Amino acid sequence: MASNSSCRSGFRSSHVAPSEEPVFLRNLAHWRGRNHHGLMHAFDNRRASEVRENRRLHWHFGVRLLHWLTAIALAAQIAIAFGPMNGPGMATMNWLPLHMSIGVTILATIVLRLCWRVSTRAPVRPTSRFMRFATTFFHVSLYAAILAVLITGWLGYRPMPFMPPARLFGTLPVPLAPSVGALSARGFALIHAKLVWILLGLAGVHILAALAHFALLRDGVMRSMVFSRSDTASRG
Ligand code: HEM
Ligand code: HEM
C-alpha cells in the first residue's frame, strides 16, 4: 500500500511496492540510474587513460620517490664527509657512526629502488637505439659507482676499540664487514674515498644532462622524474 504522504512529497517510501510506484517516479529513477552509470563510465574511462598516459611518460611513483630520497641523502652524506668529518683531532671518529648510518640508509633506498625498477617499466620515448643504450649504460654506471662506494665504505669501517659498536642511528646493530683478501680496512677506506670522486663525476654529468633536458631540449625527460598533479592517478 502506498501512503499518501509519500506520493505527495515525491520521495520513494519503503512502504511503496515497485508495482504500485507512480510511473513518473519509476521513469525518473530509471533515467537517473542510466545517466549516473553513463557518466561514471565516461569518468572511469578518462581516469584509466590518464593513468596509462602518466605511466607511459613518468618513472613509477616509487622509483621517483626513492630517486629523490637518494639524492637528498647523498648530498647530506657528502656535506658531512667533506665538512665536519674532515675536521681536526677526533672529528672523523666522532662523525663516523652518523656517516655509516646515512650510508646504510642510502644502501637500503638503492636496493629497494632497484627492486622497484626491475619490476616496473621505464618511460616510453621516441629515441634512437643508441641513445637508449647510452642512457641505460650511464644509469647502470651510476648504480655501480654508488654501490662500490657503499661496499668499500663498509669494508673500510673498523670502529676503534674504545668506540661504541656500530649501530644504525644508535638503534639496530650493523654487522662489521669480514676481512677480505690482503687489503686492510684502512686500504678499503682509501679506495672508498677515491671512488667517491668517480661517483661525484658521474653524478655531476648526470645532473648537467638533466638540466640540459629541462632548460634546452625541453623534451619531458625532467618531467618524467618529478611529481605532478596527476601522480595520485599513477600510484595504483
Ligand atoms: C654513498 C655513500 C657514502 C659516501 C658518499 C661516502 C663518502 C665518504 C668520503 C668523501 C670520505 C672521505 C672523508 C675524508 O676525506 O675525511 C669517506 C670516508 C669514510 N667512509 Fe664513507 N661514504 C659513504 C658511505 C659509507 C659507508 C656506508 C660507510 C661504512 C659502513 C663508510 C665508511 C667510511 C670510512 C671508514 C671512511 C674513512 C674515514 C677515515 O678517514 O678514517 N662510508 N666517506
Ligand atoms: C639534482 C640532482 C638530480 C637530478 C636533477 C636528476 C634528474 C634525473 C632525471 C631527469 C632522470 C630521468 C632520466 C631519464 O628518464 O632518462 C634521472 C634518472 C636517474 N637518476 Fe637522477 N637526478 C639527480 C640526482 C641523481 C643522483 C645523485 C643519482 C645517483 C647517484 C641519480 C641517479 C639516477 C638514476 C640511476 C636514474 C635512472 C632511473 C632510476 O633507475 O631511478 N640521480 N635523474
Image: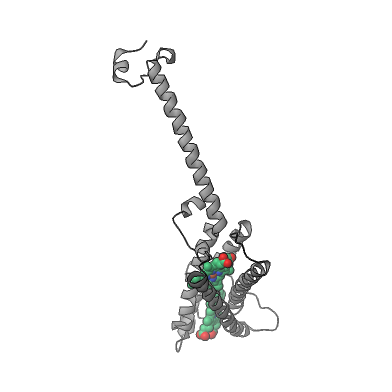
Q: How is the image coloured?
A: one colour
Residue 155 in the image, given as x and y percentages of width and height? 61, 77
Residue 126 in the image, given as x and y percentages of width and height? 61, 62
Is 54 displayed left or right of 128 in the figure? Answer: left
Front-lying residue, 65 or 50: 50
Residue sitting at x 43%, y 16%:
18
Write down which quadrant ligand 1 falls in: bottom right
Residue 165 in view, yes or no: no
Residue 41 in view, yes or no: yes
Residue 30 in the image, given as x and y percentages of width and height? 44, 24
Looking at the image, residue 9 lies above or below residue 207: above
Residue sitting at x 43%, y 83%:
84
Q: Quadrant of residue 35?
A: top left
Residue sitting at x 51%, y 50%:
50
Looking at the image, residue 129 lies above or below residue 78: above
Residue sitting at x 67%, y 84%:
183
Direction bottom: furthest residue:
88
Give the number of marks.
0
Front-lying residue, 71 or 56: 56
Q: Quadrant of residue 141?
A: bottom right
Looking at the image, residue 126 lies above or below residue 19: below
Front-lying residue, 130 or 75: 130
Residue 107 in the image, given as x and y percentages of width and height? 56, 68
Direction top: furthest residue:
1
Tell me the quarter of the image containing the N terminus: top left
